[in-house]
Amino acid sequence: MPIDFAGLRQLADASAAVAAPCSCNDAALLAWQAVPLSLELDQFEEVATLVDDPFAEPTFDEFHPAGTRIDSDDAPIAPRYYPYNRSHVARCGKCGRHYLRYTEAGGYFSELRMRALRPQLLVEAAL
Ligand SMILES: [Zn+2]
């Protein structure tokens, strides 16, 4: 079951309220990027998913009404759109901040990407 929008907002708000310094926050994952080597994967626990149906391929459409790009710091987080519709929510076990993660699969590689879940970017946009 994917997390609903209200639930996602709660996790984002909880994340924004964390003030403690942490290696995950130092990594400044404002935009999507490959998970930096400075972060240990076992530092994070998956707590929710945005994947609606694991047997269906969700859309590759992106949501950028203000002209942002997929790798913009201020690109909206619209759960039904790419790549959020393939993402899981991970919580840092050290500080409690939340992140989105998905695996970008190209022809010859796959890469785990990560982005901070920030409440001011959340948009509940229908497809
Ligand atoms: Zn952390």
Image (cartoon, rainbow, N blue to C red):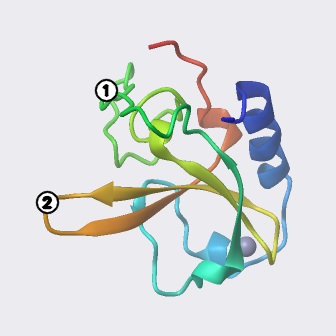
Find disc 1 in the rendering and name its residue.
61
Q: Cβ(mark 2) to ligand 1 < 8 Å? A: no
Q: Residues within 10 Å of mark 2 (few under 14, many from 20)?
A: few
Q: Which amino acid, mark 1?
A: Asp
Q: Position of residue 100 (x, y in %)?
A: 57, 53
Q: Quadrant of the C terminus?
A: top left
Q: Quadrant of the N terminus?
A: top right
Which residue is pictured at 41% across the width and 41% down the height?
Answer: 83
Q: Which amino acid, mark 2?
A: Gly
Which residue is pictured at 61% across the width and 76% down the height?
Answer: 26
- 112 is higher (above) or lower (below) than 16: below
Labelled disc at residue 116: none
Ligand 1, seen in the image, is in the quarter at bottom right
Q: Residue furthest top?
A: 126
Position of 102 with respect to 97 (left or right) is left
Find disc 2 in the rendering and name its residue.
107
**Which is nearer the eye, 54 or 78?**
54
